């Protein structure tokens, strides 16, 4: 009986969210100003190169993680002009000084509108795209890394093959490029679909609405506008690799009593079965969560912060991440462990 009541309550809350709360939130978003900028540095016209990164950030204390400086340094070293956009409402003086040494501009705004509100403000404030603009990369701080230099990855952004590139794509909700890194080339930047989409972005105060309407919606809107979208690590290729990866070792471990009862082996087995079940039933998985190991093995330079901090979808084998980074990739997990020490509550890395 309790199970039935809980299920009915869950359904009611889902209905209320999409039929009551989100329509109200959309009204709030329409009433709010789309511009939520508090300050812009420098206070003079900002000079930008032809390839620009709009890097979105949030921290409740106005601080910037040490690893983010490495990330944006890496982008700058590969010919990108960095614009740092924070939703924190303020930045610590030390963080501001470090950013000014790397970035062409720093935009501080209110924590309203999530990533897409921040990116819209940056486009508006800087009058992007400009006549000389060849590329705009939309990136955010939702990842740990990079665990490897970005030069080879950025060199793979071929705008002759696609107008818009993501690092990964997803079929959850609807097909879309995952928004932690999206690169728009010259054709996309001057397309009517690009202008129309960003004009439609409003500061709606519901994350699920932003995800469905803007994160998923931007790819759908660009494709409807005739633009070609692609991912450097495509879902289809990842699933093909992941479905067979490590099966021989798993089968070998199953042949011993220790292997069958070893908790680490069991978690790896369960996760392999999750992937194969998704493939068999055509259930869309989240590549940056469910396929984290296979992404790293194939040269992907990031781990999602949400995966290590919260593991919201209960990925079974994520406890292996330190070993994969250190022993299999030869990278240093310490910068990630440093951040996790201040982030994790009631769990171990």
Image (cartoon, helix red, strand yellow):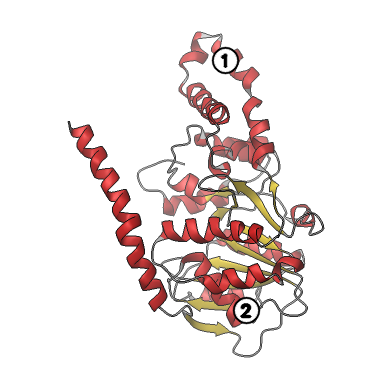
Whether residue 58 is visible: no
Image point (55%, 74%), residue name: 199
Question: Is the residue 228 above or below the residue 286 in the image?
Answer: below
Q: Residues within 10 Å of mark 1 (few under 14, many from 20)?
A: some
Distance between mark 1 and mark 2 Cα atoms: 54 Å
SS at circle 2: strand
Q: Residue furthest left?
A: 1
Relative to 193, 260 lies left or right: left
Image point (65%, 18%), residue name: 248
Q: Residue furthest bottom?
A: 44
Question: Is the residue 279 above or below the residue 106 in the image?
Answer: above
SS at circle 1: helix
* Residue at numbered disc 2: 105
Whether residue 283 is visible: yes
Q: Which badge, 1 or 2, is on the more N-terminal residue?
A: 2
Q: Residues within 10 Å of mark 2 (few under 14, many from 20)?
A: many
Q: Where residue 36 sits: x, y (%)?
A: 46, 79
Q: Where residue 90 sits: x, y (%)?
A: 45, 76
Q: Are marks 1 and 2 in contact (CB under 8 Å)?
A: no
Comparing 114 with 72, the one in front is 114
Q: Where residue 211 sits: x, y (%)?
A: 48, 57
**Picture quarter containing residue 139?**
bottom right
* Residue at numbered disc 1: 253
Q: Where residue 39 sits: x, y (%)?
A: 51, 84
Comparing 311 with 327, the one in front is 311
Image point (49%, 54%), residue name: 339
């Amino acid at each position: 009986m309790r199970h039935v009541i809980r299920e009915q309550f869950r359904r009611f809350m889902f209905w209320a969210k999409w039929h009551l709360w989100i329509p109200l939130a959309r009204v709030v978003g329409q009433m709010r100003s789309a511009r939520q900028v508090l300050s812009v540095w420098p206070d003079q016209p900002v000079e930008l190169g032809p390839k620009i990164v709009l890097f979105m950030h949030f921290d409740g204390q106005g601080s910037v993680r040490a690893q983010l400086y490495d990330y944006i340094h890496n982008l700058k070293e590969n010919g990108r002009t960095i614009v740092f956009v924070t939703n924190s409402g303020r930045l610590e003086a030390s963080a501001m000084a470090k950013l000014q040494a790397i970035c062409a501009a720093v935009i501080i705004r209110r924590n309203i509108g999530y990533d897409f509100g921040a990116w819209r403000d940056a486009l508006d404030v800087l009058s992007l795209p400009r006549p000389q603009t060849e590329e705009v990369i939309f990136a955010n701080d939702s990842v740990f890394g990079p665990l490897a230099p970005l030069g080879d990855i950025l060199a793979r952004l071929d705008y002759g093959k696609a107008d818009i590139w993501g690092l990964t794509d997803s079929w959850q909700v609807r097909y879309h490029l995952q928004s932690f890194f999206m690169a728009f080339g010259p054709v996309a930047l001057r397309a009517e679909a690009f202008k129309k989409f960003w004009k439609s972005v409003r500061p709606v105060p519901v994350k699920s609405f932003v995800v469905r309407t803007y994160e998923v919606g931007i790819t759908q809107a660009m494709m409807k506008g005739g633009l070609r979208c692609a991912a450097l690590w495509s879902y289809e290729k990842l699933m093909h690799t992941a479905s067979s990866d490590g099966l021989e070792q798993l089968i070998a471990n199953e042949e011993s009593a220790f292997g069958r009862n070893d908790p680490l082996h069991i978690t790896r087995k369960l996760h392999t079965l999750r992937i194969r079940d998704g493939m068999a039933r055509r259930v869309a998985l989240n590549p940056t969560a469910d396929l984290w190991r296979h992404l790293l093995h194939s040269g992907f330079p990031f781990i999602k912060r949400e995966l290590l901090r919260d593991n919201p979808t209960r990925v079974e084998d994520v406890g292996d991440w330190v070993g994969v980074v250190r022993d299999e990739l030869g990278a240093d997990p310490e910068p990630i462990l440093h951040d996790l020490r201040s982030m994790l509550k009631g769990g171990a890395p």
